[in-house]
Amino acid sequence: MKSVLLLLCVFIVCCLPADKKDKFTVVVFKHGKIAGDPEPFRKLLKKFEDENPGIVIRDEMLPASTDEQHQFYVINLEGKSSDFDVLSMDVIWVHEFARAGWLRDLTHMLSGEDRNDFFPGPMQAVTYNNRVYAIPWYIDAGLLYYRKDLLEKYGFSPPVTWEELIRIAQYIISREPGLYGFIWQGKQYEGLVCNVLEYLWGNGGDILRDGKVVIYSDENIHALRFIRDLIIKYKVTPPLVTTAIEESTRHIFGNGRALFMRNWPYAWNIFEKEGSPVKGMVGVTLLPSFSKGPSASTLGGWQLGVNKYSKHPEEAEKLVEFFALPESQKILAITLGYKPARRSLYSDKELIKEQPFIAGLYDVFMNARPRPLTPYYMMITQVTQPEFSAALSGIKTPEESLKAAQRQIDYILAAER
Amino acid sequence: MKKESGNRFIFPALLILFLVTVYPVFYVFYLSFHRRLLIFDISKFVGLDNYLFLLRDDRFWNALKNTVYFTSVSVSLELAIGLSIAVLLNRSFRFRGVTRAVVLIPWAVPTVVSARMWEWIYNTDFGILNYTLGAKINWLGSPFWAIHAAILMDVWKTTPFVAILLIAGLQVIPKELYMAAKVDGAGNWAIFRRITLPLLKPIILVVLLFRTLDAFRVFDAVYVLTGGGPANTTETLSIYAYKVLFQTLQFGYGSTLSVVVFLCIGSISVFYIKLLSKGIK
Amino acid sequence: MIKKTGFYLLVMLVLLYCSGPLLWQIATSLKPDYELTVIPPVITENPTTVHYISVFKERPFLRIILNSAVVASCTTVLSLIIGSLSAFALAKMRIRYKVFILGFVLSVSMFPPIATVSPLYIIIRELGLRDTWLALIITYTTFSLPLSIWILTNFFKEIPDEIYYAARIDGCSPFQIFYKIMLPLSIPGIFTTAILVFIFSWNEFLFALTFTSTTSSRTIPVAIALFPGVHEVPWGEIAAASVVVTIPLIVLVFAFQKRIVEGLTSGAVKG
């Protein structure tokens, strides 16, 4: 028994990380898995360490899904954890974390000029009660991908309204066997809410307006029914979208099996890689609109903040500042395809030469809308995800699901009263 | 000779059981009458508000329906398959030990691992199940199939437990009874119905009790396999409660849901235990 | 003859049903990435260990296995100590309200974990035990106690009361009887209990998911459930990790099949 214990102790000691870094300040940086080759990202961190002797960065990966990442942060920060210093956050979390008092106030880090340089959407998302709690890192927004070659073959131009998209899709898929018309992300997860909001907004609806719950409205019912009709009435969308996430749709489109796809900008670089079956055949445009309304695109992207309980806040701020620099954002844009949150980079000659696609995204990002800006967003989305999913798969009518959502969200927001 | 009092031997167990299970149960009742948002430091007594909302909460009723469906279908299948395996293996043959060990594999595999295994088997495009069936069924994505996929996985995972218990039950039945019945010219089916089943009844009830309770509070298997989706068609009561509790730390309403699970489990146990004690008398 | 063949065919079917999914997971773990998405999904001709290597190289997997091992072993030891003491008292000594206590222990085993997880979380957080081994060890010990007490009580009851009386007359204190006589006599029972408790702690998910948050205490089931990836699921690595953590259990099952069956049934059949 004793020898077993001894062995165990030896094992434990061996497994503990040796603390050689006494003289350095270790800043722990939490972020999602890096898309693609992590080498350029490591290089960038190395560059920071070289410029800031005395600081060592340890980057740690978050779990796969954003829901799990959120839960990780909530549970740790609620427990006042100081295990990590810099945290990357989805746009929808900043208000919640700020309200909970978990983020260091970073207002002093941004000059007026900087504030103007970041896109307005992310700036709104990181500003809570007029204080800035995070710095935009990179930005995302919903786009319409289309097959240039097929539209040309049948003499169409890219659709501007949903009606056109349906007409074109119906025409072409009836002549191209095995081709899907229009695919998007319909699994029960946050991506579904991003997709659905684009239709709700396009039709003049919303979830919250001036702090009031307005999800149960005629505009929303109409829009939600329209999405369901894409599948069952117009038959341009295959039922498999109700389980699809970004990558599943990207695979289908990337193998040349779909005409239109709603997705984030990251897919473009993959389509244009050597060996991609659709290289040179893909076009990108704004999402279509309803005949009278505007085109609406959901804002995504990640922000960097500093843990309020961090033991090295100054060093952590330096790292955030470093990633906010135009040079750093440019390097990540060129190497990983992360879209810069700074507007000025979209006219940067070198960047446009490397990534010609980026210049065209400027208008999309300028108009991208953040999801409802409220500390209660995560509770609200736990309600909307299943309700939207139920409406899309036909388990509930759009009316029933929105009515149920309205009631549940009302109950959540009653906490404030 | 009179026995000594064993109170001090049993005291540590009772203390820890009290602190870690009984006290929290009282606490959860207490929380269920509050609106408690851990992250924003909101804590208000709201009386029966949470319970009143629960009565009108579609998502709760849906979760209850899913849980009852999951429990009844999976437990009956497990009993049927488990009984067949038990009858099959309840004799001596070569490799019997190895066979029993193999039968125990699903029981020993961690639930999370088995969920991940089945997730891959169910994969629409590359899964072996669709390939074997020559089908393109979206097992985990279609509202109809997902709950059945979860049931199938649970049946695979827990049938061994059922079979092992039933084999033990079969072995207590005296061999003479079978001999006598054979002498009287009874067929296999008649023997099974007239002798095996009635004598196996108490153990079947015990198995049903264990399995019903486990299935009713199912969490990890389904949580990892489907996360409750699609469209909440696989969201069980435990998953709903867990999501409210820990995705957004709404401890008030989440505790209300926990209380309901607790009360359901309590009623099921009382029901079975009554049935059992009747059987014994 | 035909009957016999039929019987063995059926047995083969049962074996395939029980082991198939695990065997398939092993086959998956050996496939190179590009073969994972190839139809038909046959067994690979180019087995590779890349997934195993990457599981251990890119992730703090060793530390996670250590967490699970420590938590499960400590739980087993604690649960056996506390459980055997009470089982001894329940089987051999005078206890008031014995039936009531046994009923209480049994009913605790029926408690749904979800009903206690929220208050326990608050308590553990207040005690500063969040994300530690201790939080899991305490919880697991408690939830495995009913099982330990139940199985061990049954074992102790089989030891004749006369031994107890004889030892008393020889001047042994009850505690001496417990560890000098009873424990050695019920080694098989203790062993059985230990295996079951260990497997329970090794596999538990709900509490582990809630009380742990970093690699310093995260256990295997949580790590496998929350495998990181961008948009895509790394099937090969998940399969490899699954196989690694399941193998010890399979070894246990094959080595101690009889004991496990005994443990599983002792509660049910006699009770």
Image (cartoon, coloured by chain):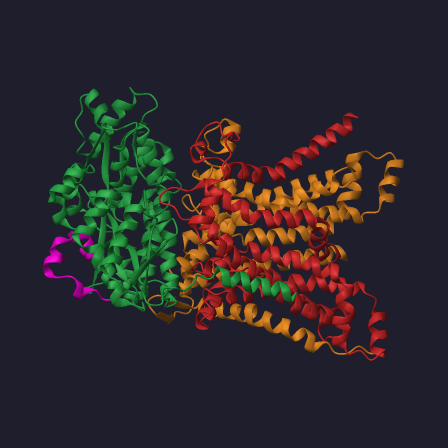
Chain colours: A green, B orange, C red
Image coordinates for residue B30, horizontal then vertical, percent: 47, 70
Image coordinates for residue B258, horizontal then vertical, percent: 49, 61
Above or below, comparing residue A370 to residue A417 in the picture: above
Q: Quadrant of the N terminus of chain A?
A: bottom right
Image coordinates for residue A13, horizontal then vertical, percent: 50, 63
Classified by dominant secondary structure, the portion drawn in magenta counts as helix
Is A106 within the magenta?
Answer: yes
Is residue A146 visible in the rendered structure shown here? yes
Q: How many marks?
A: 0
Quarter of the image for residue A110 reads: bottom left
Quarter of the image for residue B99 reads: top right
The magenta region covers: A104-126
Nearest to the observer: residue C88 or residue B84: C88
Is B67 within the magenta?
Answer: no
Q: Residue at x 32, y 37 (%)?
A: A228
Q: Residue at x 55, y 42 (%)?
A: B153
Q: Residue at x 29, y 56 (%)?
A: A88
Viewed as shown, does residue B4 lie left or right of A290?
right
Viewed as shown, does residue A218 lie left or right of C250?
left
Q: Residue furthest bottom?
A: C171
Above or below, comparing residue A381 to residue B25 in the picture: above
Image coordinates for residue C142, horizontal then vertical, percent: 59, 66
Q: Quadrant of the C terminus of chain A?
A: bottom left
Is residue A293 visible in the rendered structure shown here? no
Nearest to the observer: residue C67 or residue C78: C67
Nearest to the observer: residue B185 or residue A122: A122
